[in-house]
């Protein structure tokens, strides 16, 4: 390939070509897609790529795109084809004046990938976003410390079924997959699977959080889903996952949740026994 450290800068990102990888650094400007800003930078091993294309873009631009191999990148696996082109982290948009330079780098990449395996990978080759991670869905706050996913329900959005089930904790060891549906489509959600897919609607499933306007945005919920997915696959492959200390509980938050639980009890949505058990659980967290 070209000299180590060669850089090709485009709109919102710059690619630095190394001997065995491409380091992508995303800009943090106001016009840069928020997903790119959240990712910061990513190192893509050449072994994770199946090919490269160069195509005409819009309004006097060209698009250089690296094509990841199936199974190589947890972010793209979690996205499952739902990302818009403008948020595709493997696209580099350049002004038409740099087309010749882009062709040169595309040819260099193709030469390096010739004869390489372009089929599905046995494990993830691109690093996942690092825990701890958290985001606000419409009905809960989701957090992940590297070993356990936790859903803490919001009284303003969670269904009575979720309140009755109580706040949820899901050790990675119990999960088999992650289902992410973009918040930019109808019924967006993040669902944790422990075997067969749940037939329950996401707003009634304690193993799922639902998205809404301003809740569960792509740049927060997708990296979260990718990190959980990577942890699940790594566990299956026997890769050790470091633990991260759980955040300290906020007494004011516990008090607010007990108050709302009392409102549900008075409204007849929670039985006396359910109220007593859940209240004891919340007090135990202090």
Image (cartoon, grey):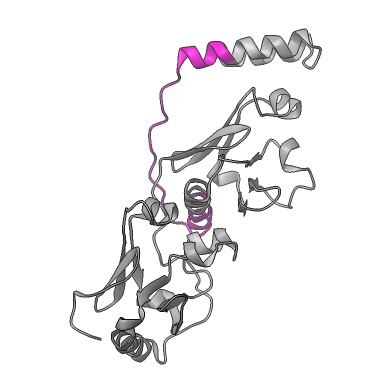
Q: Is residue 174 left or right of residue 203?
A: left
Q: Is residue 19 left or right of residue 169?
A: left
Q: Is residue 253 magenta?
A: yes
Residue 101 makes an appearance in the image? yes
Q: Nearer the viewer, residue 60 or 63?
A: 60
Magenta region, residue range? 228-256
Q: Is residue 244 left or right of residue 212?
A: left
Task: Quadrant for the N terminus, please.
Answer: bottom left
Residue lying at 55% horizontally and 62% vertically, measured from the top left:
83
Residue 286 makes an appearance in the image? no
Residue 117 at x, y = what percent?
46, 84
Residue 150 vertical position relative to residue 253 in the rendered view, above or below: below
Residue 272 vertical position relative to residue 164 in the rendered view, above or below: above
Q: Nearer the viewer, residue 212 or 81?
A: 212
Residue 77 vertical position relative to residue 130 in the rendered view, above or below: below
Q: Is residue 260 left or right of residue 118?
A: right
Residue lying at 70% horizontally and 27% vertically, measured from the top left:
165
Residue 34 at x, y = what percent?
43, 52
Residue lying at 43% horizontally and 70% vertically, measured from the top left:
90
Residue 62 at x, y = what percent?
41, 80
Residue 255 at x, y = what percent?
54, 10
In this rendering, the count of numbered labels is 0
**Which residue of the protein is positioned furthest toward the front in this rendering?**
59
Q: Nearer the viewer, residue 267 or 236?
A: 267
Q: Is residue 254 magenta?
A: yes
């Amino acid at each position: 390939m070209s000299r180590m450290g060669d850089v090709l800068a485009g709109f919102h990102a710059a690619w630095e070509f190394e001997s065995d990888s491409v380091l992508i650094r995303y800009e943090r400007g106001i016009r840069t897609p928020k997903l790119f800003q959240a990712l910061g930078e990513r190192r893509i091993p050449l072994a994770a790529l199946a090919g490269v294309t160069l195509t005409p873009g819009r309004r006097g631009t060209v698009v250089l795109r690296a094509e990841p191999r199936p199974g190589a990148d947890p972010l793209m696996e979690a996205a499952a084809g739902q990302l818009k082109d403008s948020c595709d982290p493997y696209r580099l948009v350049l002004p038409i004046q740099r087309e010749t330079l882009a062709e040169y780098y595309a040819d260099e990449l193709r030469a390096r990938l010739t004869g390489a395996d372009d089929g599905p990978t046995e494990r993830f080759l691109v690093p996942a976003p690092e825990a701890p991670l958290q985001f606000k869905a419409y009905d809960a706050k989701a957090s992940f410390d590297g070993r356990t996913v936790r859903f803490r329900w919001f009284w303003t959005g969670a269904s009575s079924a979720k309140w009755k089930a109580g706040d949820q904790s899901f050790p990675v060891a119990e999960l088999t997959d992650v289902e992410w549906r973009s918040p930019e489509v109808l019924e967006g959600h993040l669902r944790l699977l422990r075997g067969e897919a749940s037939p329950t609607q996401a707003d009634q499933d304690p193993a799922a959080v639902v998205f809404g306007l301003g809740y569960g945005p792509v740049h927060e919920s997708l990296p979260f889903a990718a990190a959980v997915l990577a942890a699940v696959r790594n566990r299956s492959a026997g890769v050790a996952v470091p633990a991260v200390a759980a955040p300290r509980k906020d007494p004011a938050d516990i008090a607010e949740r007990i108050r709302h639980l009392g409102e549900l009890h008075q409204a007849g949505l929670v039985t006396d026994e359910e109220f007593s058990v859940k209240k004891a659980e919340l007090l135990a967290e202090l």
